[in-house]
Image (tube, rainbow, N blue to C red):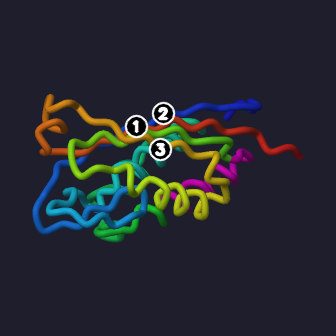
Amino acid sequence: MAEQKYRIGIGYDIHPTAADRDLVIGGVKIDYEKGLLGHSDADVLVHAIIDALLGAVAFDDIGTLFPDTDDRFKGADSVLLLKSVANKVQAEGYWINNIDANIIAEAPKMMPYIPQMKAILASELGLADTDISIKAKTKEGLDAVGKGLAIEAQAIVMLEKISD
């Protein structure tokens, strides 16, 4: 990888909603009638952040690193996967400068959970809460997300080269 002072990555994830699954977003278990379907805990926010981190250092995506064909990741806590990826980023000589993310869902309302999400992510990544922005958006009833059939997330990260 060519050495650069700053690197930026973008991530995206979407999972369908499903009965009989926990809804975990940003490491927070949210009390809701449906969860998200996926091989791991299907935490769309954390998955988007993982892909943004991987993209920033030009690594393969989350599906390559943690394939859904590998039983080691069945039901995995995505925050632990995030920590693993953050360690890989640091091993490349970068630290996370900031994270900006969107959660897109019609329901449940995400705003009450965002402070806890930020606290969990900041703690796991060694960041201040002020280094993480998480916004809640809706699709105004449009498409699968707007009809409550899925939840998606987007994330952008900026990495900075660690001084020697």
Give the amino acid at mark 3.
Ile
Q: Residues within 10 Å of mark 3 (few under 14, many from 20)?
A: many
Q: Residue at x 23, y 57 (%)?
A: 38
The residues bearing labels 1 and 2 have C-alpha atoms spaced at a distance of 7 Å
Highlighted magenta segment, given as a residue range: 82-95
**Is residue 93 a member of the stretch shown in magenta?**
yes
Q: Residues within 10 Å of mark 2 (few under 14, many from 20)?
A: many
| Quadrant where the image shows the N terminus | top right
Horizontal side of 159 relative to 62 (left or right) equals right
Indicate which disc, 1 or 3, sits on the residue closer to the N terminus: 3
Identify the residue position indicated by label 3 in the image: 134
The secondary structure type at the circle numbered 2 is strand
Give the amino acid at mark 2.
Ile
Q: Residue 49 placed where, x, y %?
A: 47, 46
Q: Nearer the viewer, mark 1 or mark 2?
A: 1
Q: Is residue 103 above or below residue 142?
A: below
Identify the residue position indicated by label 1 in the image: 154
58, 11: nearer the viewer: 11
**Is residue 149 a member of the stretch shown in magenta?**
no
Indicate which disc, 1 or 2, sits on the residue closer to the N terminus: 2
The residues bearing labels 1 and 3 have C-alpha atoms spaced at a distance of 10 Å
Q: Residue 148 placed where, x, y %?
A: 14, 44
The secondary structure type at the circle numbered 3 is strand
The secondary structure type at the circle numbered 1 is strand
Residue found at the very far front of the displayed protein: 112
Indicate which disc, 2 or 3, sits on the residue closer to the N terminus: 2
Q: Is residue 58 above or below residue 63?
A: above
Q: Are marks 1 and 2 in contact (CB under 8 Å)?
A: yes
Q: Is residue 64 above or below residue 37?
A: above
